[in-house]
Amino acid sequence: MESVAAGPGPATYDRIGTGYRLICRPDPRLHSLIGQALEGARTVVNVGAGAGSYEPEGADVTAVDPSDVMLDQHPGVRKVKAGAECLPFPDGSFDAAMAVMTVHHWPDVRRGLGELRRVARRQVVFTWDPAHRPELWLLEEYLPEIRELEYARFTPLSEVVDALDAHTVLTFPIPYDFSDGFQIAYWRRPEFYLDPVVRQASSTFAQLAPSVVEPEMAKLRADLDSGAWRRRHAELLDKESVDYGYRLLIAGETFGPQ
């Protein structure tokens, strides 16, 4: 594995990334959507690659991440330790660059998106719009502290679209049985939030002190035991998916069959 300075400070996922692959299992529906956006790309750089979720089959993928813990879990051969803002590749090195639920971790989002545009002919970015409503009930009823963290680190979608010069914005409603361990994944399965292993795989949960989280999880457990949660959220129980503001952005060239 090549090593390139990742910038000041330890990477967030060096602290919380152990066992990440066990909880954050790629969802086939999101995998299909991202795969369609990358169709025709033979060389791909995955920036903020983590454990390698959603990488296209059949492509030559280079994984980039600032975290040793995450790169150690990546199954690929080409792995580079680096931050998004300074990618160690010449201009136009790849057919496509992908970034999945990672831009909110970048210290300089515009610079990082500029690097995606510099090193690849097409860019595919999956992210979340902090201005979207509805928001997850967990924030309103139990942990508004998560809202504060999310709004502080997520760049408004319009700014990401502008910096990327995205020509396509696709909505991805979150299915009720979404297999990836995003914080939003359990909107219809609230009992999962009671599991500390599940919470540890979420970067926002992992940043909150146990003294904040544990009393609220005790309240959630009591609401589930009493049926209060189900009564408050009866309208969710029959839904197959909900649009919580997750978007796939596509920019750059469109490829024909290879």
Image (spheres, rainbow, N blue to C red):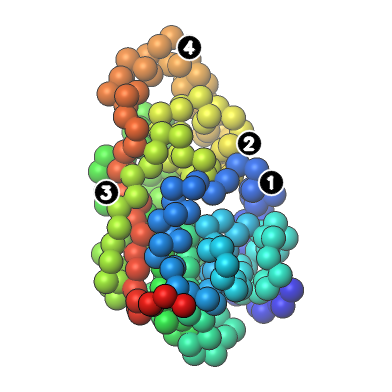
Q: Nearer the viewer, mark 4 or mark 1?
A: 1
- In the image, what residue type sits under mark 1? Gly
Distance CA(mark 4)–CA(mark 3): 31 Å
Quadrant for the N terminus in the image: bottom right
Q: CA distance from mark 1 to mark 2?
A: 9 Å
- Mark closer to the chain start, 4 or 1: 1
Between the residue at mark 2 and the residue at mark 4, the CA separation in whole angstroms equals 21 Å
Furthest residue toward bottom:
90
User: Which comes sooner in the sequence, label 3 or label 2?
Assistant: 3
131 to the left or right of 214: left
Callout 2: helix, strand or loop? helix
On residue 19, the disc is: 1
**Residue named by callout 2:** 197
Query: Disc 2 marks which amino acid?
Result: Val
SS at badge 3: loop
**Residue displayed at 52% across by 57% down:** 54
| Earlier sequence position, callout 1 versus callout 2 | 1
Q: Which mark is residue 225?
A: 4
| Residue lying farthest to the top in this orientation | 226
- Tag 2 and tag 4, C-beta contact below 8 Å: no
Mark seen at residue 157: none
* Pointers 1 and 2 in contact (C-beta within 8 Å): yes
| Image location of residue 127, percent across then percent down | 39, 58
Q: Is residue 149 above or below residue 137?
A: below
Q: Which residue is the site of mark 3?
A: 132
- Labels in figure, total: 4
